[in-house]
Image (cartoon, rainbow, N blue to C red):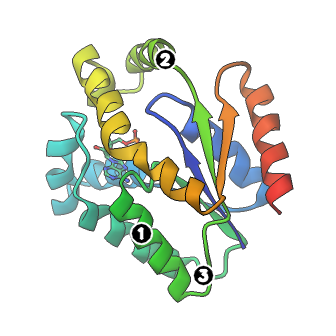
């Protein structure tokens, strides 16, 4: 199985590239952000609790997202592989993902990190906020907080995978298709 983590700061293009990757390699997409937003739209208890964190640009507690991933992996054991997008976002989540996959005889194949610098991220997110309908894209101070949370809590995950020789950086600036080609080249090398 090909189990990829598509990684990078908010606004790096993870969602856009994940859609293309799952189509080409026939993988199952896991976006914790999308799952949380659909819980919120359905006004479930989990969604309403998560909203308190999401609206401020803070991370939802680890146990909540880990539980969501566990449930979805279990339901998709017949898949050719998975693309994790927006997960793991903390070292605890990375360890939990390893444990969860290992129990099923699986492992993360590689971490693909989309690299985009700060000012470009802010520009993209402000732009996306004009029609995404996302509360957390509307306010520059919340956008800045999300980037800071990424740098503080999520970046250490890169080192975690680097130690396991599973770290693959890709330039996240340029044409969408050009970035996609670079991602495919990295995936084809891993396979
Ligand atoms: P995203 O769509 O990936 O930008 O996620 C939007 C928001 O959902 C984040 O700012 C967090 O509040 C929450 N979220 C998504 N994925 C995670 C995760 N793996 N861990 C904690 N919070 C998450």
Residue annotated with mark 1: 95
- Using the numbered discs, state the Cα–Cα distance from disc 1 to disc 3 in whole angstroms: 20 Å
The quadrant in which the C terminus is found is: bottom right
Mark 1 or mark 3, whichever is nearer to me: 1
Res. 76 in view: yes
Q: Where is residue 63 in the image (x, y as percent from the top left)?
A: 25, 67
Does residue 47 sit above or below 68 in this rendering? above
The quadrant in which the N terminus is found is: bottom right
Residue at 50% across, 50% down = 159
Residue annotated with mark 3: 77
Out of 80 and 165, give the one closest to the viewer.
165
Residue at 78% across, 58% down = 25
Residue labelled 2 has its Cβ within 8 Å of some atom of ligand 1: no
User: In the rendered structure, which disc, 3 or 2, sits on the residue that comes first in sequence?
Assistant: 3
User: In the rendered structure, which disc, 1 or 3, sits on the residue that comes first in sequence?
Assistant: 3
Residue annotated with mark 2: 124
Residue sitting at the far front? 163
């Amino acid at each position: 199985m090909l189990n990829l983590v598509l990684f990078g700061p908010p606004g790096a293009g993870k969602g856009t590239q994940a859609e293309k990757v799952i189509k080409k390699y026939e993988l199952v997409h896991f976006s914790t952000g999308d799952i949380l937003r659909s819980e919120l739209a359905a006004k479930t208890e989990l969604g309403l609790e998560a909203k308190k964190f999401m609206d401020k640009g803070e991370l939802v507690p680890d146990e909540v997202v880990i539980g969501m991933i566990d449930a979805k992996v279990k339901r998709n054991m017949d898949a050719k592989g998975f693309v994790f997008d927006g997960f793991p976002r903390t070292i605890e989540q990375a360890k939990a993902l390893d444990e969860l996959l290992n129990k099923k005889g699986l492992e993360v194949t590689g971490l693909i990190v989309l690299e985009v610098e700060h000012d470009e991220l802010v520009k993209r997110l402000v732009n996306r906020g004009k029609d995404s309908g996302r509360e957390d894209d509307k306010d520059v101070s919340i956008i800045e907080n999300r980037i800071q949370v990424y740098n503080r809590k999520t970046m250490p995950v890169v080192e975690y995978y680097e130690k396991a020789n599973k770290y693959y950086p890709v330039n996240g600036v340029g044409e969408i298709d050009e970035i996609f080609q670079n991602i495919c080249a990295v995936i084809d090398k891993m396979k």
